[in-house]
Image: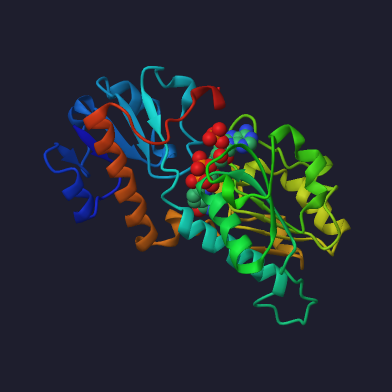
Amino acid sequence: MIISFVKLPEEAKKILKGYEVVDGNITDEILQKAKVILAFPRTINETIIKKAKNLEAIQTITAGADGLPYSILPRNIKVFSNAGAFNHSVSEHAWALILGVAKMVGRKKAHRTYLLHKKILLILGAGEIGSEIARIGKQAFFMHVIGVSRTFKYPQYFDEKYNPNELSEVISRGDVIVNALPLNKYTERILNYEILRKVKENCIIVNIGRGDTMDEDGIYKLLKERPDVRFATDVFWIKEGREDFDSKLWELDNFMGTLHIAGAGGGEEVMNYAIIEAVKNIRQYLETGKARNPVKFEDYL
Ligand code: NDP
């Protein structure tokens, strides 16, 4: 049985035709029969795991698989993320934020604008989203694109490629820095003050990955000290178990934000597309035993 903790659109149900699917009114009895669960990571808790005794796989709706209770997940359960389902919506959003702060859109005061044409674009996390941001930077603004990532899914969009351990050497080269990293034990607070203070003059920093990959106090300190640096984010920090949009960053003139709407939070159009990608992956798993985006537990434990 496939259990979805979100209502499935008709198209998604058609993709799962032939399988028993429940997408509402999930009782203990239904949970016990679950072979695959489709959910947001933070929906999954210890109670669900204990009751779902036949569970084989969890498919997340989100591209980021952070927020699952890895320490209590039995190792035989497979986790698949939804990477790839948000590359268009989030890359468009990243460019909205880049252009928003470069041109200071929506401000009543006249600000200096920053030019992007032929500048250096530094992308952290060269996966589906990072690569699409890179492609747009290259093709639309003729930017020189540098990537810092563990893997490069579309290496053709990167002029230079670096490992994560080279970040502190290359961070100072980006005119525009975009963080498209997942949050895992290696990336948590990777962008701390010591790294951030190396950014070049008039640098634009954009975060569409996860808030907790940056140090909130660190970026605040940098923006206070360096009014030339501009920061825009769609993602905020998890406080008391939930993303807290109430950041002190909003006080600052060189800050711009959106409330985690680049992906599924942006509404039905993006959400439905993401659900359809997720159920295609579930179908692939049920038919072949394999699926896209298997999550490495060791990234989180
Ligand atoms: P992908 O898995 O396609 O890309 C992630 C990339 O980052 C991969 O190349 C991955 O390498 C690399 N990576 C992972 N860990 C590290 C590390 N420690 N150091 C350097 N590189 C690393 O995912 P997507 O591009 O689809 O999504 C990326 C992230 O964007 C999500 O995890 C999520 O946090 C965020 N996101 C935000 C949304 C929003 O609404 N703002 C919506 C959707 C996603 P490897 O293949 O080796 O793991």
At a point 58% along the width and 49% down the height, the residue shown is 156
Q: Is residue 213 left or right of residue 288?
A: right
At a point 34% along the width and 33% down the height, the residue shown is 291
At a point 60% along the width and 48% down the height, the residue shown is 180
Q: In which of the image's four quarters is ligand 1 placed?
A: top right
Quarter occupied by the N terminus? top left
Instruction: Please state which of residues 111 and 121 is positioned toward the viewer in this rendering.
Output: 121
Q: Eyeballing the image, is 272 above or below 293? A: below
Q: Is residue 43 left or right of residue 52?
A: right
Q: Is residue 65 left or right of residue 117?
A: left
Instruction: Give the x, y percent position of residue 288.
Output: 25, 29
Instruction: Please state which of residues 104 and 91 is positioned toward the viewer in this rendering.
Output: 91
Instruction: Give the x, y percent position of residue 144.
Output: 71, 57
Residue 182 at least partly seen: no
Q: Eyeballing the image, is 117 above or below 128? A: below
Quarter occupied by the C terminus? top right
At a point 34% along the width and 55% down the height, the residue shown is 273
Count of all numbered marks drawn on residues in the image: 0
Instruction: Please state which of residues 170 and 111 is positioned toward the viewer in this rendering.
Output: 170
